[in-house]
């Protein structure tokens, strides 16, 4: 299947400046393309995955991807999709963020491919040396104020009470210059981005054509949303980050495992490299038995493997199994701490613990309202300590502590609590 046909089947085409011409160009040989990532924070989040995966899809098809870290544009702030002015970051903050993001970009792209290795660039390198007068003369004169004001990202901000600063208004000039520079220096012919970048991308296409007389292309993919239309990648506890120190691999895995049924088909197509045949099989299984959640498991496994590696998936699956009553086995401390973060956790003084009764511990863990109810629950066989059924005579001793400090209690199938003994 032609790459463009595959991308269309996956729902990854929102707009293209000239789809027929781009197809003909790709049929002639490898094309160089780029996608930009502004380092407004020290980690990308799952909302940025689409750009990286698109670059990877092109690379797998033999094309040459460039990941651009916006060390310069990140200092300005893109108004696209924003209702208010961004806070400006210091150069030191930007440098730190760029280094963090570069490391994440290298996870999904192959920089050692023998014929089409990925490239990583920072637009600060070619933007910083330009003087203001040079920029106004060589770049600014090619932009019509009327056309700039017509861009959706600018018009929506101008109509809002907060307005838009000249700084953010000039963002599309900088992004356009990036495309021109990459076409000149690296023969880049295609820029990709989310659908909110359409105005910036088309501005770059026009600018490059005016400056070089060259034909270049722009491609946007749809922004990902949840079933209710809300922003993808947000949870009650905040954004889902690619940095494992900010979002653990377990929680990352859980985020995709909890995908709504209404969105699972879309996410399988857009976030994985599974074949059409494999995805349609999973879709059929999902329709026949949605309770089994085979499609969600496949999605979580595929995406977590790409971002964090196969070992992280295994740890996440072990942690998930614990919350379904599996034996603790050889689970490591880091994985168990992920479990602790998912269930109510209560402190317990060490001098109140050793040799204590299970009845007392159920009260401490808020799993029973009274000693009499705790006793009934235990006698009915519905209470588990460290995922092993316990009886009413059970005394809890220091050997029961997991990693020297934790007790995992469960009542019934789903009521969990952890006691943190200090």
Image (cartoon, rainbow, N blue to C red):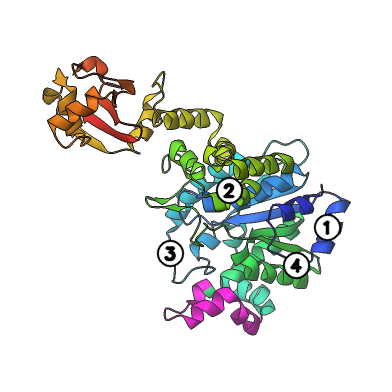
* Residue 15 spot, x, y in % from top left: 70, 65
Q: Which residue is mark 4?
A: 17
Location of mark 1 (residue): 23
Q: Which residues are magenta?
A: 144-168
In this orientation, which residue lies closer to the viewer: 114 or 337? 337
Q: Position of residue 405 (x, y in %)?
A: 25, 25
Instruction: State the CA–CA distance, disc 4 to disc 1.
Output: 12 Å
Residue at the spot of label 3: 88
Q: Which residue: 71% across, 64% down?
A: 180
Mark positioned earlier in the residue sequence (2 or 1): 1
Q: Position of residue 3 (x, y in %)?
A: 78, 50
Which residue is at a point 72% across and 63% down the rendered structure image? 218
Q: Residues within 10 Å of mark 1 (few under 14, many from 20)?
A: some
Quick one: label 4 or label 1, which is nearer the N terminus? 4
Foreground residue, 96 or 24?
24
Q: Which comes sooner in the sequence, label 2 or label 3?
A: 3
How far is disc 2 from disc 1 in space, using C-alphas? 29 Å
């Amino acid at each position: 299947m032609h790459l463009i046909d595959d991308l269309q089947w996956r729902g990854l085409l929102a707009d293209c400046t000239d789809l027929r011409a781009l197809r003909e160009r790709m049929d002639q040989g490898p094309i160089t393309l780029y996608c930009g990532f502004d380092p407004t924070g020290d980690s990308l989040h799952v909302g940025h995955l689409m750009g990286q995966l698109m670059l990877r899809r092109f690379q797998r098809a033999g094309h040459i991807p460039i990941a651009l870290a916006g060390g310069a544009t990140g200092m300005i702030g893109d108004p696209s999709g924003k209702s208010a002015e961004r806070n400006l970051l210091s150069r030191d903050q930007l440098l730190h963020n760029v280094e963090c993001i570069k490391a994440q970009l290298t996870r999904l792209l192959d920089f050692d491919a023998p014929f089409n290795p990925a490239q990583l660039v920072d637009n600060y390198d070619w933007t910083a040396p330009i003087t203001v007068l040079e920029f106004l003369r060589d770049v600014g004169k090619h932009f019509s104020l009327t056309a700039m004001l017509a861009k959706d990202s600018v018009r929506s901000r101008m109509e809002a009470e907060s307005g838009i600063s000249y700084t953010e208004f000039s963002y599309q000039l900088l992004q356009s210059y990036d495309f021109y520079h990459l076409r000149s220096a690296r023969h880049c012919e295609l820029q990709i981005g989310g659908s909110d970048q359409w105005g910036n991308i088309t501005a770059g296409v026009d600018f490059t054509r005016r400056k070089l007389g060259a034909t270049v292309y722009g491609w946007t993919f749809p922004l990902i949303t949840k079933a209710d239309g809300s922003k993808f990648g947000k949870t009650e506890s905040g954004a889902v980050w690619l940095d494992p120190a900010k979002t653990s691999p377990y929680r990352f895995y859980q985020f995709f495992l909890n995908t709504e049924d209404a969105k699972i088909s879309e996410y399988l197509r857009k976030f994985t490299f599974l074949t059409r045949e494999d995805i349609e099989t999973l879709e059929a299984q999902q329709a026949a038995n949605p309770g089994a959640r085979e499609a969600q498991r496949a999605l979580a496994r595929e995406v977590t493997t790409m971002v964090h590696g196969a070992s992280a998936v295994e740890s996440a699956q072990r942690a998930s199994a614990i919350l379904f009553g599996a034996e603790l086995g050889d689970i490591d401390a880091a994985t168990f701490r992920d479990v602790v973060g998912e269930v109510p956790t209560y402190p317990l003084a060490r001098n109140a613990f050793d040799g204590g009764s299970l009845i007392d511990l159920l009260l401490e863990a808020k799993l029973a309202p009274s000693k009499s109810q705790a006793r009934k629950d235990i006698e009915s066989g519905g209470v588990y300590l460290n995922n092993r059924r316990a009886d009413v005579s059970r005394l809890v001793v220091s050997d029961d502590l997991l990693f020297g400090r934790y007790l995992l209690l469960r009542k019934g199938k789903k009521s969990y609590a952890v006691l943190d003994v200090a």
